[in-house]
C-alpha cells in the first residue's frame, strides 16, 4: 500500500483500439482507524495502465456502504488498473488488478486511515548495522524495523523548503555514498541531504521492515564513524566483517555470529539510543588504496631502477683494446 499527499491527474487517451470490451470494477473501501472520519463521499480514482503507461482515469465517489463503482471499464489481457482513494487529504492505493475479460466484474480493496501529523510516536525496533570490506572501502547495510503504534497514517508538522513533509529522517556517516534502497523506502519519495535523507511518504500503522546500503571510501588506516539516531531506537547490533581491521569504541564484542550467507561476523550489542543521540567508533588497521600520486612515484622508482640496470649493462669499458659489457652484480 502506498500513501501519498496527492492524487493523480486525469489523463484521457483513446483506448478503444486496445480493449476487447468493457466491464466494471468495484472498489471496497474500509477504514483502519477506530472511530475515524467518515469515508462516504471520498473520491476514488481508477487508473488504467498499458505497458506501464497510464491511459485513462475514471472517477467515482465512495457510497454509504464503503463502495465505489466504476462502469464501462475497458478490459484486455494487457490492461492493468489500480484504485486510488483520497481520505483525510491523503491518497491510499489498492493492489494492482488485471483487467481480464473474465470475470466481467472486478474488485479492488482499499484500506484508508485518518491522518496524524505527530511523528514523535514513530520509533525503530530492531536495528542491525552490517559492516564488511569491499574493494577500496567498506560496505554498510542497515536493517531497521520502523514502528507506528497508532491506528493512523503518520505525517509530520515539519516541512522542507518545497513544502514536502519530512516524515522519517535518516542520518548517514560522513563519507557515505551510493545509497541503495530495498523494501519499505520508495526512492521517488526520498529527499537526499548532505548528511543523509528523509522520507516524504506517510507511514501507515504497524511495523515496517526496511533496508538500505551504502559505501565509504578508505583514505587512511583509521576510519572514524559516527552514527546518529533520529528516532528512539532499541535492539541495536553492529556486525563486523572487517578482516584484519578492528573496531574500537563499541566495547567488548558480544560474540561471533554466522550470517545468512554462511560467513562469520563479530557482533556488538549497543544499548538503546534516544532520538538525537549518536554513537561514535573507529575501524583501525585498514589498508588505504594507493593514490595515483603514490603509484606514479612507485612506477618512477621502478623505471629508474630499470634504467640504471640497463645503463650498467650497456656501458662500454676498455679492456685490452676490446669492449665488453659489464654484468650487474
Image (tube, rainbow, N blue to C red):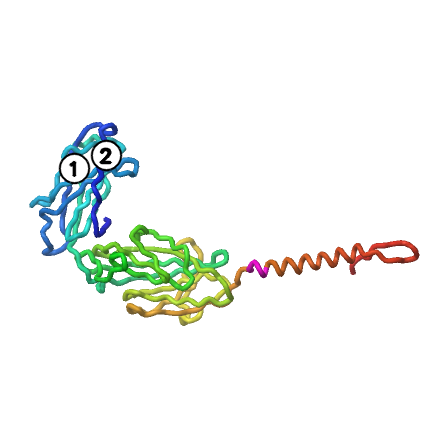
Residue lying furthest front in this view? 161
Residue at point 75% right, 57% down?
309
Disc number lying in front (2 or 1):
2
x and y, in percent, of residue 324 in the image: 86, 54
Which image quadrant: the C terminus?
bottom right
Q: Residue furthest right?
A: 320
Quarter assignment of residue 101: top left
Q: Residue at x 18, y 32 (%)?
A: 103
Q: Is residue 184 visible?
A: no
Q: Does 40 sit above or below residue 243?
A: above
Give the residue displayed 66% in from the left and 60% down from the top. Answer: 301
Q: What crowding class fits label 1: few (fewer than 14 Cα within 10 Å), some (14-19), or many (20 or more)?
A: many
Please check the rendered image and state whether residue 293 is part of the magenta-colored stretch, yes or no: yes
Q: The residue tagged with tag 1: helix, strand or loop?
A: strand
Give the mark, 2 or 1, whose residue is nearer the N terminus: 2
- Residue depicted at x 14% and y 51%: 31
| Residue 298 lies in quadrant | bottom right
Residue highlighted by disc 1: 25
Q: Position of residue 222 (x, y in %)?
A: 49, 67
Q: Characterize the magenta stretch by its predominant secondary structure.
A: helix
Q: 162 or 135: nearer the eye?
A: 162
Left or right for 64, reference 204: left
- The quadrant in which residue 171 appears is bottom left
Provide residue 32's location: percent of width, then percent of height. Answer: 15, 53
Q: Nearer the viewer, residue 84 or 266?
A: 84
Q: Is residue 310 highlighted in magenta? A: no
| Label 2 – label 1 distance at C-alpha | 19 Å
Q: Which residues are drawn in magenta?
A: 290-294
Asked if one can make out residue 313 in the rendered structure from this viewpoint, the answer is yes
Q: Which mark is residue 13?
A: 2
Q: Nearer the viewer, residue 257 or 92?
A: 92
Amino acid at each position: 500500500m502506498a500513501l501519498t499527499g496527492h492524487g493523480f491527474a486525469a489523463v484521457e487517451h483513446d483506448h478503444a483500439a486496445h480493449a476487447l470490451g468493457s466491464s466494471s470494477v468495484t472498489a471496497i473501501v474500509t477504514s483502519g482507524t477506530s472511530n475515524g472520519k467518515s469515508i462516504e463521499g471520498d473520491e476514488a480514482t481508477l487508473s488504467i495502465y498499458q505497458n506501464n503507461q497510464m491511459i485513462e482515469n475514471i472517477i467515482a465517489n465512495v457510497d454509504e456502504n464503503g463502495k465505489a463503482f466504476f462502469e464501462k471499464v475497458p478490459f484486455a489481457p494487457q490492461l492493468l488498473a489500480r484504485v486510488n482513494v483520497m481520505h483525510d487529504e491523503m491518497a491510499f492505493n489498492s493492489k494492482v488488478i488485471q483487467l481480464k475479460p473474465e470475470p466481467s466484474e472486478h474488485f479492488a480493496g482499499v484500506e484508508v486511515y485518518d491522518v496524524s501529523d505527530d511523528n514523535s510516536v514513530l520509533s525503530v525496533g530492531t536495528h542491525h548495522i552490517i559492516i564488511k570490506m569491499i574493494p577500496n572501502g567498506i560496505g554498510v547495510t542497515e536493517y531497521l524495523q520502523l514502528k507506528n503504534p497508532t491506528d493512523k497514517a503518520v505525517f509530520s508538522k515539519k516541512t522542507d523548503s518545497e513544502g514536502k513533509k519530512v516524515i522519517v529522517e535518516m542520518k548517514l556517516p560522513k563519507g557515505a555514498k551510493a545509497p541503495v534502497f530495498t523494501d519499505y523506502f520508495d526512492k521517488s519519495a526520498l529527499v537526499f541531504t548532505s548528511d543523509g535523507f528523509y522520507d516524504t511518504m506517510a507511514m501507515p500503522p504497524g511495523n515496517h521492515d526496511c533496508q538500505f546500503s551504502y559505501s565509504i571510501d578508505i583514505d587512511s588506516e583509521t576510519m572514524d564513524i559516527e552514527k546518529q539516531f533520529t528516532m528512539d531506537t532499541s535492539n541495536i547490533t553492529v556486525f563486523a566483517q572487517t578482516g584484519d581491521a578492528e573496531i574500537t569504541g563499541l566495547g567488548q564484542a558480544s560474540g561471533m555470529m554466522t550470517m545468512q550467507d554462511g560467513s562469520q561476523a563479530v557482533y556488538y550489542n549497543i544499548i538503546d539510543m534516544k532520538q538525537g543521540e549518536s554513537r561514535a567508533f573507529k575501524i583501525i588497521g585498514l589498508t588505504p588504496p594507493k593514490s595515483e600520486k603514490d603509484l606514479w612515484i612507485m612506477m618512477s622508482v621502478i623505471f629508474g631502477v630499470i634504467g640504471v640496470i640497463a645503463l650498467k649493462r650497456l656501458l662500454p669499458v676498455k679492456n685490452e683494446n676490446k669492449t665488453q659489457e659489464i654484468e650487474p652484480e
